[in-house]
Amino acid sequence: MKLRRSERMVVISNYLINNPYKLTSLNTFATKYEAAKSSISEDIAIIKKAFEEANIGDIDTLTGASGGVIFTPSISETEARTIVEDLCQRLSESDRILPGGYIYLSDLLSTPKILQNIGRIIANAFKGEKIDAVMTVATKGVPLANAVANILSVPFVIVRRDLKITEGSTVSVNYASASSDRIEKMFLSKRSLKPNSRVLIVDDFLKGGGTITGMISLLTEFDSTLVGVAVFAENAQSEREQMTFKSLLKVSEIDVKNNNVVVEVGNIFDKWKKEREWT
Amino acid sequence: MKLRRSERMVVISNYLINNPYKLTSLNTFATKYEAAKSSISEDIAIIKKAFEEANIGDIDTLTGASGGVIFTPSISETEARTIVEDLCQRLSESDRILPGGYIYLSDLLSTPKILQNIGRIIANAFKGEKIDAVMTVATKGVPLANAVANILSVPFVIVRRDLKITEGSTVSVNYASASSDRIEKMFLSKRSLKPNSRVLIVDDFLKGGGTITGMISLLTEFDSTLVGVAVFAENAQSEREQMTFKSLLKVSEIDVKNNNVVVEVGNIFDKWKKEREWT
C-alpha cells in the first residue's frame, strides 16, 4: 500500500498505539507502505516527538539487525490525578453504600473509558518492570486485569473461587477470607500460567488482604514471581497484615448510618511525589 | 499546546482511535492545539483518507452548531477472515479437548490482542445499529463483552449465576440449563441496566442456548430491547431452539475418543458474503 507521508504517519501511529510493548522493525513498515527505510525513520521521529509532547507515551528505537521501534504508553501525573479525583467524587456518591458497609462499584468497573484510564495508570506505575502476566480473582477483578493487560500487551490469568469443568486440571490453595472469617479455597487452571512468570496482581477492593495473600501463594505453586500488587480501592479502616501494594483510591470512612463515604487518592501517587523530590 | 501540522495529525489520530463513536467538535481540537478551525478540518481530511485506505475505520463529519467528527472503527473482510482462520487452527489443537467433550478456551479469551480483534469483528457485524450496552454472563463472557464494549464505547453488563452482596438489589429469572438438565437462576443488579436500553448479548460458547434465552428474558424485566446475539463459538452438534445469532467459529465435531476437534468459520461471514453478492 503506497501512502503519502502524512497518511503514512497516521497509519503508523495507529499501529503503534494498538501494539504497545511490541518491537517492530522499520523494514516491516518500509515494505508495507512501499517507502525507503530512511523515510520511515523520519516518520517515527515526528511521531515520537508528538507522542512525548502530548504525553501519549515513549517511542524507543533499537538499532542493529534485531532492532526496531517499541511504543510504551504513558500518562502524566496531571492527567492521572484528574482521572482519580473524578473517581473519588463518583465513589463518594451517597447512594453507593450497600447494607453491610459495601460500596457499589460495578458501574465504574464496566465503563470502557474508566477501565482504560485505570489500566494506563496502573501500567504506568510499574513501568520499567518486566511483567509476563496480570493475575486477578473472578469476577470483579477481571475487567481491571483485562485493562492493565491491554496496556502491557500480556495475557491475564483468572483465579476462581469455584471449580469449573471448562478449566481442566487446576491447582488450589487455601486462604483466609477476612469478610467471612473462614478458610476458603481458590483455584487456578494448570495451563493458564507458565512456570517462571513474573506476575502483577490486580484486584478491585482491598480489605483484609486474604485474597491477595492467597494469590501470592498460588504464584509459589506455579514457580512464579510477584512483581507487585495494585488495587482499585483500599479500605483504610481494615486491619490487615503487612503488605506492599499500590492503590488508586483510599476509602477512609464508610458511615452506613449517615450514608456517608469519604474517599481520597491512593498511594499510587507517592511514586510521582518521589520523582518530583528527586528532580 | 502548539504543535506542528504533522505532530498535530498524530495526536488527533490518537484521540480518535481512543474515543470511537464519540462526537467531538472541531473547536475542541482548534482550542487545544492553538490552530485555526480550517487547519483542523484539513488535518481531519487527511486522517480520514488514511483511515479508509488502511481499513482502520470511517470518520464522519457532521456540520452545524452541534457538529464535529465521529470515528467508527472498522475491519476488512480479509483481515477478519485471517484472524478467524487463525483461531480455527488454534481451537483445533488436540490438547484442548477436556473430559466431557469441553474445549479449553481460557488462554485465547485472556490474550489482549485476540480479544481486541474479536471485539472489532463483532462490533463491525452490528455496525449501524444503535447499541446502549453489551450484556454477558459471568465469568467467561466478561472479557469478550469488555472487548466489544471497548470498540462500541458503551458500558457492559454482567449477569451472574450467584448472588453477591456487592451488587445491591437484583432481578432474577429462571432458565433451562441444557448442560445440567435443570432449571437454574440468573441475577442482574437493578442499577446495572437503564430501562429502554438497546442491548447486544455476547457469550463465549453456544450449546443449548439456555443461557442466551435467560438473558433475553432478563431484558424484558428491564424494559429493554435485544439488538442481537454474538458468540465466540457455536457447537453445531447441539440441539437447540430456533435462535438468531452470529458466531465467529463453528465447532462441527468433538471426538473425545480420538482427540479430534473440527472447527470452521462461523456465520458472521455470511454478512460479507451477502454484501459481495449485492455489489
Image (cartoon, coloured by chain):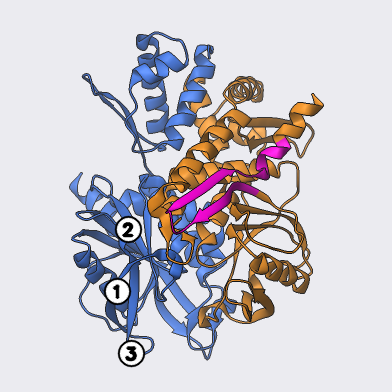
Chain colours: A blue, B orange
- Residues marked 1 and 2 touching at CB (< 8 Å): no
The label on residue A172 is 1
Which chain does the numbered disc 3 sit on?
A: A
Q: Which residues are magenta?
A: B247-271
Q: Position of residue B226 (x, y in %)?
A: 76, 59
- Image-quadrant location for residue B21: top right
The answer to whether residue A24 is seen in the rendering is: yes
Considering the numbered disc 3 on the image, is that residue within a helix, a strand or a loop? strand
The label on residue A191 is 2
Please report whichever mark, 3 or 1, sits nearer to the chain's N-terminal start: 1
Few, some or many C-alpha atoms within 10 Å of disc 2 (few <14, some 14-19, many ≥20)? some
- Say which amino acid is labelled 1: Ser
- Image-quadrant location for residue A111: bottom right
Q: Position of residue B146 (x, y in %)?
A: 54, 55
Disc 3 marks which residue?
A: A182
Of the two numbered discs 3 and 1 in the rendering, the one whose residue sits closer to the viewer: 1
Q: Nearer the viewer, residue B261 or B118?
A: B261
B9 left or right of A148?
A: right
Mark 2–mark 3 Cα distance, whole angstroms, equals 28 Å
- Residues marked 3 and 1 touching at CB (< 8 Å): no
Q: Residue at x 78, y 70 (%)?
A: B220
Which chain does the numbered disc 1 sit on?
A: A
Q: Main secondary structure of the magenta part?
A: strand
Mark 1–mark 2 Cα distance, whole angstroms, equals 13 Å
- Say which amino acid is labelled 2: Arg
Q: Residue at x 34, y 61 (%)?
A: A135
